[in-house]
Image (cartoon, rainbow, N blue to C red):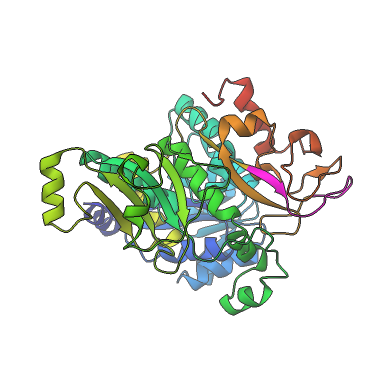
Amino acid sequence: MLYEHLQARERVGRPIRIGCHGAGWMGSGFVAAVERIPGLAIAVLADANVTAAQAALVAAGVPAAQIHVASTPGEAMDAIRRGYRVVSDDMTLPAQVEAVDIVTDVTASPAAGAEVAYAAIRHGKDVVLVNIEADVTVGHVLKRLADEAGVLYSVSSGDEPGCLMELWDYVRVLGFEPIVIGKGKNNPLDPTANPTTVAAAAAAAGKDPYQTASYVDGTKTMFEMACAANATGCVPLRRGMTGPEATPETITALFRLQEDGGTIPFPGVVEFVQGPAMAGGVFITCRMPDARLAADLKYLKVGDGRYSTFFRPYHLWFIEAPLSLAAAHLFRTVTLAPLPRPVAEVMTVAKRDLQPGENLDGFGGYTFYGLIERAEIAWAENALPAGLAPGARVVRPVPAGRVVTWADVRLDETATVVRLRRLLRSNGIHPA
């Protein structure tokens, strides 16, 4: 159905016009994916590096002569009317352009994602983030503001949380009881990883070493599973989750309930597993309460009938994210959005001893890593959300391995992401 709707828009020359922020590795990949899908088009692409934005469009097949650099909404609209694509260094410009149908941020920056989403909501635009870090940090506020403004707020599919939500919907509709939802980590967990220790691996993969280290030190995984937790109500069994080794053959027995010989004390847990056989995939281990259907599942060789693990062995990140934007615009479909109250948090943990006067660096850097915890515990400990950590100024010593608190740092209170996060408490959005 989606394909036919998009083909119809392509035939009449009325594509869904996307306003996008981000032209880095993720953003340029998203642009390339959009430009291969009929009925979709990048109308405005914003990035601090305008040259990179231009290059992303050209690499995706847009002639350089059809790209216009604009700094105001009026200038951008004039260019679009004349058939141009627009690039800008203003991340809020896509939200301000009348011709844009839907807005997205394709970065891993909570600050950027918050800025872009907030601008979209204020200007009456639907927003679908390809930025789970922003959702974990301020998604609850953004969702409430979007609802009040009568616009749509969602996180896209493609990354593990969105792919998990599609599985979550599938198994629950069919009457399965989800026991554990999770992902297969692509590399062994090492919380001490930093850009220096992963430099060789990053170079071999053609990736930024900070980005690579954020995968290895677990920060990315913690954000992914916190995003899924906040959308489903599932919780980590312990701080940081357990991360056992698993394969498609062993995972179902591992994640049965304890009463049935497994390791899980109650239904509704978020986890990750390690090992190459599960790497890159998402899974939900379920129980089938109905004896008749359990017998049928056993006959169909789906687990042992009573317990089954539904495993999607891949996620296509920004390549499939455009599908969420298309479904949101055409059918008002929300792929993933947080529940009204936080369930999980990603806390900031000192990667080394921190001293007053220094600034925390970015995800995957030398100063901190992220660690998932139940929201009520993280809030009780006054833990600094990892999404607010980049650039925070340390004001008192924090030893390595300790959770960094709000009182340990000074934040830029003018930043949109900080102001939105402050709204959680003032608007009564807190753990149950």
Q: Position of residue 205 (x, y in %)?
A: 56, 76
Q: Please determine whether, in this image, residue 252 is positioned above or below residue 147.
A: below
Can residue 37 be spotted in the picture? yes
Camera-nearest residue between 261 and 416: 261
- 286 left or right, relative to 393: left
Can residue 100 be spotted in the picture? no
Q: Position of residue 24 (x, y in %)?
A: 59, 63
Segment tinted magenta in the rendering: 347-359
- 221 left or right, relative to 153: right
Residue extending furthest toward the right? 357
Residue found at x 57% / y 20%: 428
Camera-nearest residue between 238 and 125: 238
Q: Position of residue 185 (x, y in %)?
A: 49, 61
Q: Is residue 351 magenta?
A: yes
Camera-nearest residue between 51 and 163: 163
Q: Position of residue 163 (x, y in %)?
A: 38, 52
Residue found at x 45% / y 28%: 147
Q: Is residue 137 magenta?
A: no
- 389 left or right, relative to 218: right
Q: Please determine whether, in this image, residue 51 is positioned above or below residue 399.
A: below
Magenta stretch, main secondary structure class: loop
Figure disc tally: 0
Q: Please determine whether, in this image, residue 19 is positioned above or below residue 123.
A: below
Residue found at x 37% / y 40%: 334
